[in-house]
Amino acid sequence: MRIGHGYDAHRFGPGEFVTLGGVRVPHPQGLEAHSDGDVLIHAVCDALLGAAALGDIGRHFPDNDAQYAGIDSRILLRHVRDALAGRGWRLVNLDSTIVAQAPRIGPHIAAMCQNLAQDTGVAIDSVNIKATTTERMGFTGRGEGIAAHAVVLLTAL
Ligand SMILES: [Zn+2]
């Protein structure tokens, strides 16, 4: 078995929604990124790649590569899943935390879990997403952006 950890953060910018776990959550600002800015999926990708000792998301999908401009991060996640399967690894379970002062994440967690379970090929009860504020402390607390942490466990296929 292998364990992996991932962390990501994106700054708010112009927009009308943020994409988290493949779900568009309405918000007066968007997240600045080369892709769709899905911090949760990016943290999950890094955790998966980390567990398999395959580096990080930046190595697999360089942010200066035009083919990834504005890309749906769920496509990246499915690429990562396939890369791991190709090396004989399968996800056992995934736990994650979104750190955001706003928007409210709770009502969207079930849909996010569904997306992550589908893209990683595990049952819904193997995926957990939590959300927290930092009680207005730090960059997330000041509403400058959103961060996400993820931990995964892999097993040999
Ligand atoms: Zn990112």
Image (cartoon, helix red, strand yellow):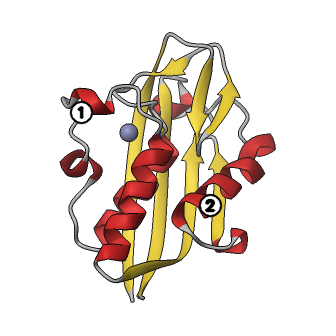
Answer above or below: position of 9 versus 46.
above
Closer to us: 1 or 137: 1
Answer above or below: position of 132 versus 103.
below
| Helix, strand or loop under label 2 | helix
Taking 11 as reference, is 137 left or right?
right
Q: Give x and y (percent) for residue 62.
A: 21, 39
Q: Give x and y (percent) for residue 44.
A: 45, 57
Looking at this rendering, what residue extends furthest in the top direction?
A: 14
Question: Residue type at mark 2?
Answer: Gln
Q: Residues within 10 Å of mark 1 (few under 14, many from 20)?
A: some
Q: Residues within 10 Å of mark 2 (few under 14, many from 20)?
A: some
Q: Give x and y (percent) for residue 49.
A: 31, 64
| Residue sitting at x 68%, y 57% | 113
| Residue sitting at x 62%, y 60% | 118
Proximity of marks 1 and 2: CB atoms separated by less than 8 Å: no
Taking 54 as reference, is 44 left or right?
right
Which residue has dot 1 on it?
Answer: 63
* Ligand 1: image quarter: top left
Quarter containing the N terminus: bottom left
Can see residue 43?
Answer: no
Q: Quadrant of residue 69?
A: top left
Answer above or below: position of 128 versus 73.
below
| Residue sitting at x 32%, y 66% | 83
Q: Earlier in the sequence, mark 1 or mark 2?
A: 1
Taking 69 as reference, is 115 left or right?
right
| Residue sitting at x 57%, y 33% | 19
Which residue has dot 2 on it?
Answer: 118
Taking 7 as reference, is 111 left or right?
right
| Helix, strand or loop under label 1 | loop
Q: Which mark is residue 20?
A: none
In this rendering, the count of numbered labels is: 2
